[in-house]
Amino acid sequence: MILAAKKNPDNRNSDRPFTWVSKITLLVLLSLFYTTSQAQSINFIFQPIFSPKRTALSYQILVDYLRETTGLDIKLVTAVNFPSYWETMKKGKEYDIIMDAAHFTEYRAKRQGYTILAKVPDTVSFSLVTGEEELVLDAEELIGRKIASMSSPGLGGIRLAQMFPNPLRQPIILEAANSLAAIENVKKGEAVAALIPTPMLNSVTGLNTVLTTEPVPHVGISASPNVSKEAQKAIKKALIDASKSKKGQKMLEKINFPAFVDANIKTYAGNAVLLDGVWGY
């Protein structure tokens, strides 16, 4: 006689602990996969004082340094010129990390909630220059003559407009795509003068300086509210600590900056006013 095994009323529940553990494990794994797969990259854009190609060549090493140091997915983004840069900036969505001039840096901090992470030490100015064969001692001598410059609302374009406030006494503005193009305009005889960032004079020869503008705080790096506080903290630390490591020092040498130092909205106070009169401000 075969005796049937007596059913244990608890047998139907005996696999439940395994089932729930499995479900919890599966949910955790799916959550991790979702988080990783959905992690957004951080766009890092630089003010368009160079062509997009030259910008990428100049600053990719900084982006690579930040990627390696922070472990964040940071990508370099370029802009064609200041008008398109300004239009995109006003939307406040596509630019996560930005390195640019004082007036834009304060504008975003005040109007768009960006956090200023760091800056290049000291100040920066613009210089009005001519070819070495041109003898120009005063900007007024350039009224009615061609000056190559990047357009407003780039700081160069704004500074040039300040030099010639009288609408009846203006130079002929030859809009240049970037500062290197403005210098080429002068060297080719297409313009008598150009307005360029003063630091560029360290690497360019054959130019005479007519005047230099009032300095403003050097370029700053700021982060959008879309970038998490943890990511902002990591990027800030990597920037400020760059001068303390061989890898960071190599990066700084390549981008021709001595270091990055701490900065905040007070550092750039009063510079957004330079955008007064610019469309959209």
Image: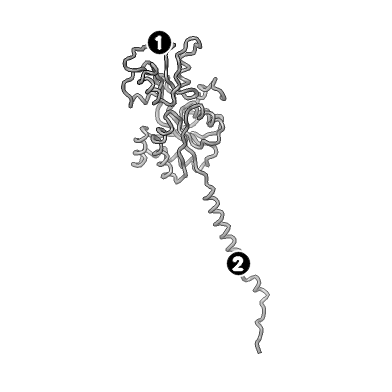
Give the quarter of the image for residue 21.
bottom right
Give the quarter of the image for residue 248.
top left
Q: SS for tag 2? A: helix
The x and y percentages for residue 117 are: 47, 35
* Quadrant into which the C terminus falls: top right
The x and y percentages for residue 88 are: 53, 31
How busy is the neighbourhood of tag 2: few (under 14 within 10 Å), some, or many (20 plus)?
few
* Quadrant into which the N terminus falls: bottom right
Amino acid type of the residue that numbered disc 2 sits on in the rendered structure: Pro
Residue at x 66%, y 83% (from the top left corner) = 4
Examine the rendered structure and indicate whether residue 236 appears above or below residue 150: below
Distance from disc 2 to disc 1, alpha carbons, whole Å, reads: 89 Å
Q: SS for tag 1? A: helix
Give the quarter of the image for residue 27.
bottom right
Residue at x 37%, y 19% (from the top left corner) = 186
Residue at x 54%, y 39% (from the top left corner) = 226
Amino acid type of the residue that numbered disc 1 sits on in the rendered structure: Glu
Q: Is residue 281 left or right of residue 261?
A: right
Name the residue that disc number 1 marks.
141
Name the residue that disc number 2 marks.
17
